[in-house]
Image (tube, rainbow, N blue to C red):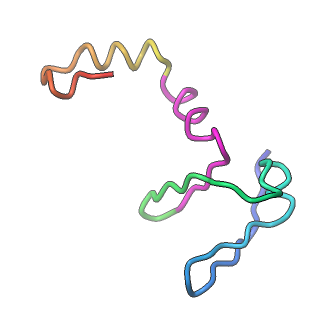
Amino acid sequence: MAATEEFLVSKSGQMSVPAGVRRRWGLTEGGRVTVVDLGDAVVLLPPGGRQKLLSEALSAEDHLRFVNGLADSELATT
């Protein structure tokens, strides 16, 4: 579901997330979200959204294949 809504950000950096979004994301009592700063855009992800996004972008098998192919042993950790 793609939707565009404006969120209010206060001087202190607090953000007001629209009620419909809070209900859909299960945040009616508040909670944590993930903020991804892309440089020219910001992406907000609901709880669990980061893992879902990553798993859809890169399968566990592809990740393991990539890690196993790294030449630097200090980087080659899972």
- Tell me which residue sits at (33%, 22%) in the image: 78
Q: Quadrant of residue 63?
A: top left
- Tell me which residue sits at (72%, 72%) in the image: 16
- Tell me which residue sits at (13%, 20%) in the image: 71
> Where is 47 relative to 30, above or below?
above
Magenta highlight range: 42-58
- Tell whether position 11 is magenta: no
Q: Position of residue 32 (x, y in %)?
A: 63, 54
Q: Position of residue 73 (x, y in %)?
A: 14, 21
- Left or right: residue 51 compared with residue 73: right
Q: Position of residue 27 (x, y in %)?
A: 77, 54
**Residue most extreme to the left:** 72
**Nearest the eye: 28 or 11:** 28
Q: Position of residue 1 (x, y in %)?
A: 80, 44
- Left or right: residue 23 compared with residue 46: right
**Nearest the eye: 10 or 70:** 10
- Tell me which residue sits at (46%, 65%) in the image: 40
The mark tally for this picture is 0
